[in-house]
Image (spheres, rainbow, N blue to C red):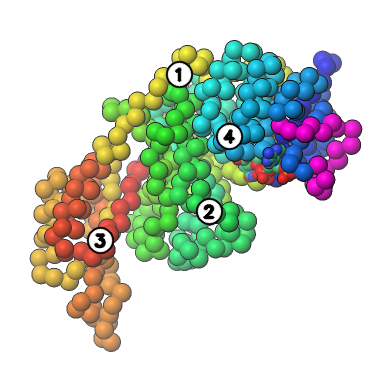
Amino acid sequence: MAAPLRLGIAGLGTVGAEVVRLIESEGRTLAARCGRSVRVAAVTARSKAKKRGIDLAGIAWANSPLELANNPDIDCLVELVGGAGEPALSAIEAALKSGKSVVTANKALIAKHGVRLAQAAEKHGGALNFEAAVGAAIPVIKTLREGFAATGVNRVYGILNGTCNYILTRMEQEGLSFAECLKDAQRLGYAEADPSFDVDGHDTAQKLAILASLAFGTKVAERAVYVEGISSIAPEDLRAASDLGYRVKLLGVAVRTAKGIEQRVHPTMVPKSTSIAQVMGVTNAVTIDGEGIPPITLVGPGAGGAATASAVLADIADIARGVRVNPFGRPVDRLRVTEKAPMERHEGGYYIRLMARDLAGTAATIATRLAEQKISIESIVQRHPDGVDENGAAKKASPVPVILITYATSEDAVYRALQAVQRDKVISGRPQVIRIEKN
Ligand SMILES: NC(=O)c1ccc[n+]([C@@H]2O[C@H](COP(=O)([O-])OP(=O)(O)OC[C@H]3O[C@@H](n4cnc5c(N)ncnc54)[C@H](OP(=O)(O)O)[C@@H]3O)[C@@H](O)[C@H]2O)c1
């Protein structure tokens, strides 16, 4: 049997400790599959004294991720510290520059420095594997990079953040507010104390940027992603969506268009009949629309120690087997700069909820403003107002919720029409707008 693959593991938290545990429990299976054993040679974390429920006897301790990366007794650095910068960046760079391979679950770092790190891997011959960075246990990186090696991708989209999907699922099923569901998600450990990174869409954006690069052969560009979070979604939007045959999901969508590549993260209405609409709770899902083949949807756990460690181990297994694939599926000098499609020119259907003032001519004014922008209405629903008198009749002064679904139109046409409606003072408050993704 070949010499063991010697690992240096930086980070022994939720994922790192589970990786150590899995290597211990699955070591024989791994060795049988790879033709070579895998051994943890050295580790590091912030605290050496912390109790972690793992056996570190006989394993060297490094004082920093960088020291670990430079240890000549390891062949592969497993970076599970996290963060878009230090100390992860220098450690990974040092490991790659000395010809070692790297496995990481760090989406923030790959989204920001992926190209630079891929270049170092390519130059010095090591592997840079990051399957766990997107969708944890869902093998979506491998699917795009290897499964779609000879098949063009037109669109990749998915539910990439379990916290947001959990919140939207509870809001829909129980009619609760965003704030109530967020509080529960925090209590159950699905959301951080500062939830903004998740609920404002940035976590999804980092993952989407990585998927877009793999799908379209472009340099990973987090800044090219348009981002909107879920905090403005109200229970009445989910109710109206449901009545109209849709669900609302926070989707990351990367799509090739005639105007360039759109990368966007926003609450999205999807028909209830689609695979992605069936994905509830903290589960993640990614759909890939390949050229000439029906869409493929991968569904599974997108977070958690065990799920993430399973993907980390799969990456380690590839390195043990001697499999080395270009990190973004092609040599770095073949990756193109993303030609960003402007969001104003996005085309699709829209859900619009307006609080129409109970004035003569309101409906006609709204219809005129939409017609001026050549926006056609697929359906219109006037919902029962909140303010009703003792006989169940609408109070005269209460604004009336009006819900419109448009046929495909452009983003700037929708916003021009809504600005005109606001100037006309026939609605109160800000209109709610949710983009629709039909299939
Ligand atoms: N958790 C998930 O479900 C999940 C899913 C997908 C991807 N990921 C990614 O996996 C990575 C690790 O996540 P995690 O949830 O395991 O994080 P975590 O539980 O916070 O663990 C982080 C580990 O890094 C160590 N660390 C932090 N700063 C350090 C420093 N300056 N020097 C040395 N060690 C340091 C910590 O040491 P101490 O223990 O001593 O504090 C801890 O062991 C992140 O990139 C994350 O995005 C996580």
Q: Are marks 2 and 4 in contact (CB under 8 Å)?
A: no
Look at label 1 and name its amino acid.
Leu
| Numbered mark located on residue 195 in the image | 2
Quarter-of-image position of residue 65: top right
- Label 1: how many residues lie within 10 Å, few (<14), some (14-19) or many (20+)? some
Q: CA distance from mark 2 to mark 3?
A: 28 Å
Q: Secondary structure at mark 4?
A: loop
**Which sits earlier in the primary sequence, circle 3 or circle 1?**
1
Which residue type does callout 2 highlight? Answer: Pro
Q: Answer with the quarter of the image where residue 94 lies.
A: top right
Which comes sooner in the sequence, label 2 or label 4? Answer: 4
Q: From the Cβ of disc 2, is ligand 1 less than 8 Å away?
A: no
Cα gap from disc 4 to disc 3, whole angstroms? 43 Å
* Amino acid type shown at disc 4: Gly
Task: Please say whether residue 158 is visible from this viewpoint.
Answer: no
The residue that mark 1 highlights is 335
Find the magenta span and give its range: 48-65
On the image, the x and y values in percent for residue 356 come to: 21, 65
- Point out residue 14 in the picture as x, y percentages from the top left corner: 70, 45
